[in-house]
Image (spheres, rainbow, N blue to C red):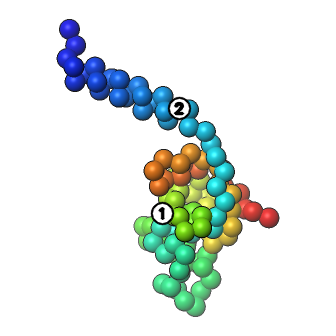
């Protein structure tokens, strides 16, 4: 009736959807940066780090969150991320691999 590969594909898809749907939004606190410079903004030494982040993102880099020594690429909320470049922020979202799917991005006070 159905081939084994079709059944396996359907089961794998259902497992993936099930796992992803149960992923809870979690808070991550770190410095909002870009995935090229990360911690060291040496491309624009005479400018604030925020200017470097914005320039790198405009040139094709992605916003990122630096949490300790770990760098997570941000997916979503780029307008909020741009306003908070180089600041300490709290991002609430789902982490999949090294990509943080942001639901909210807020400054840490």
Asked if one can make out residue 58 in the rendered structure from this viewpoint, the answer is: no
In this view, 101 is above or below 43: above
* Viewer-closest of 58 and 75: 75
Q: Position of residue 5 (x, y in %)?
A: 22, 24
Q: Residue at x 56, y 37 (%)?
A: 23
Label at residue 49? none
Which residue reaches farthest right? 109
| Position of the C terminus by quadrant | bottom right
Asked if one can make out residue 35 in the rendered structure from this viewpoint, the answer is: yes
Viewed as shown, does residue 72 lie left or right of 29? left
Q: Quickly name the residue at label 2.
A: 21
Q: Residue at x 48, y 28 (%)?
A: 18
Mark nearer the N terminus (1 vs 2)? 2
> On the image, which quarter does residue 61 sit in?
bottom left
Element type where label 1 sits in the image: loop
Crowd band around label 1 with a 10 angstrom C-alpha radius: few (<14), some (14–19), many (20+): many
> On the image, which quarter does residue 50 sit in?
bottom right
In this view, 83 is above or below 95: below
Label at residue 62? 1
Which residue reaches farthest front? 69
Q: Residue at x 21, y 19 (%)?
A: 4
Element type where label 2 sits in the image: helix
Q: Position of residue 21 (x, y in %)?
A: 53, 32
| Position of the N terminus by quadrant | top left
* Viewer-closest of 100 and 60: 100
Q: Position of residue 99 (x, y in %)?
A: 48, 53
Crowd band around label 2 with a 10 angstrom C-alpha radius: few (<14), some (14–19), many (20+): few
């Amino acid at each position: 009736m159905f081939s084994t590969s079709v059944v396996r594909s359907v089961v794998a898809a259902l497992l993936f959807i099930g796992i992803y749907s149960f992923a809870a939004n979690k808070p991550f606190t770190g410095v909002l940066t870009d995935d090229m410079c990360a911690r060291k903004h040496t491309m624009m030494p005479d400018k604030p780090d925020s200017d470097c982040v914005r320039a790198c993102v405009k040139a094709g880099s992605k916003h990122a969150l630096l949490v300790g020594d770990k760098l997570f690429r941000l997916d979503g909320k780029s307008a909020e991320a741009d306003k908070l470049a180089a600041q300490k922020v709290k991002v609430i979202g789902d982490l999949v691999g090294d990509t943080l799917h942001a639901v909210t991005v807020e400054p840490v006070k």
